[in-house]
Amino acid sequence: CIKQHTSLHHSSSPHTSLGKLKYTPTTCAVQCEEILENLEQMNMELDGGMASYPDLISYHFVMDAWAKSCHADSGAKAEDILNKLTFLSNKKRADLRPSTTTYNIVLDAHSNSGKSAHECEAVLQRMHAQYEAGNNEVRPNVMSYSIAIDACGKSKSVDGARRAERVLRKMEQLGGLPGYEDLKPNVVSYTAAIDAWAKSGSREGADRAEAILERMEIRPPSNGVGATDAVRPNLATYTAVIDAIANSHSSDAGPRAERILQRIKYLYEQQHTSPSSSSSISSATDIEIKPTKIVYNGVINAWCKTINHAQSAVQAERILNEMLELYESTGDESLRPNVISYTTVIDAHARSSLKSVQSAKRAEEILRRMIDMHRQHEGGSGGGGGG
């Protein structure tokens, strides 16, 4: 974007000192749009000639620049360009008719703006209205819905999580109708909805996340409106459920998170003991389901956030020790405890309702172990590493 802009902008605006510009994603988007406007102006000066008129790809390029800028106004900017395309295509430029791709870029721009749940739902409704009116070029697809679900989650609120699940339900309903089979939610859609509940930090988030997980794991009847084919959860799905449980701060957060960990262990064993099971799982997810430091850290965090549990710090330390033992016995780097692993357990001891000298000593001992392990790792890798 920057390289292309430099040459174009230099030729059209020779008085601008490009050397003094500080490029950021936002300035790149602003100046890409300036280039687009310059091309439009050149076309007008040529009395309507098409030699320099931007094509649809050019408009998509600028819209995508706004989407990637993550600016607060990026959604509005992209939607302004969408409206311009709609106007032009209704006049004399049928080749500029917005497509599903155009709308998906607008959805992405709204999603990255940070204030997007309502706007994304409105864009989806606009797509459906046009499609139902006979415009087949703007039919929403799975990506459209998945972006909207992710956008709802970025609000980090209960309302956003409910919106995300509402969009997911819409996908499930449409996916069961003739002609809409390709709108059935995939693992990305489900995981985004679960992640929305995790980000909400609400008590009901754990229940809703596990309910969505159950919908994925249990295959519903193949007939009837709203029925969907089974979608196998992947490691990101299970990790998002653990995060939702941890962020619920419930009195049973630790045990519930451990049950998900046990489920992951079971699936991992199945993958390595049953060739047919391994084949079906890997083909459905493309990611091996296995316990990793990310999973263990999530469970440790759940124990740390478990309220009214006298042994939460002890249980968090137990999970840390289990992870450490697995790492030492296998040498699997994905299981090596990192700074987050240790500091979360230290925090659990600091939060401990016991507030005893023993708890303080345990926290100090864990800190010492973290420092020792870091030194050992640095020595073993020639001074590099971390993690």
Image (tube, grey):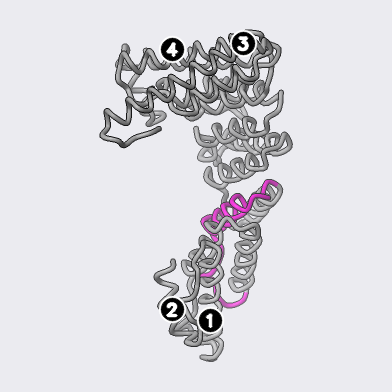
Q: Nearer the viewer, residue 6 or 373?
A: 373
Please determine whether, in this image, residue 71 is positioned above or below residue 188.
below
Tell me the residue that label 1 is attached to: 38
Q: Nearer the viewer, residue 119 or 169?
A: 119
Horizontal and vertical percent for residue 150?
Answer: 59, 41
The disc labelled 1 sits on which kind of residue?
Asn
Q: Is residue 293 magenta?
A: no
Magenta segment = 91-117
Tell me the residue that label 2 is attached to: 8
Tell me the residue that label 4 is attached to: 322
The disc labelled 2 sits on which kind of residue?
Leu
User: What separation in Å lies between label 2 and label 1 (alpha carbons)?
Assistant: 10 Å
User: What separation in Å lies between label 1 and label 3 (alpha carbons)?
Assistant: 71 Å
The disc labelled 3 sits on which kind of residue?
Val
Give me the disc on residue 373. Answer: none
The disc labelled 4 sits on which kind of residue?
Glu
Which is nearer the N-term, disc 2 or disc 1? 2
Image quarter in which the C terminus is found = top left
Q: Secondary structure at mark 4?
A: helix
Image quarter in which the N terminus is found = bottom left
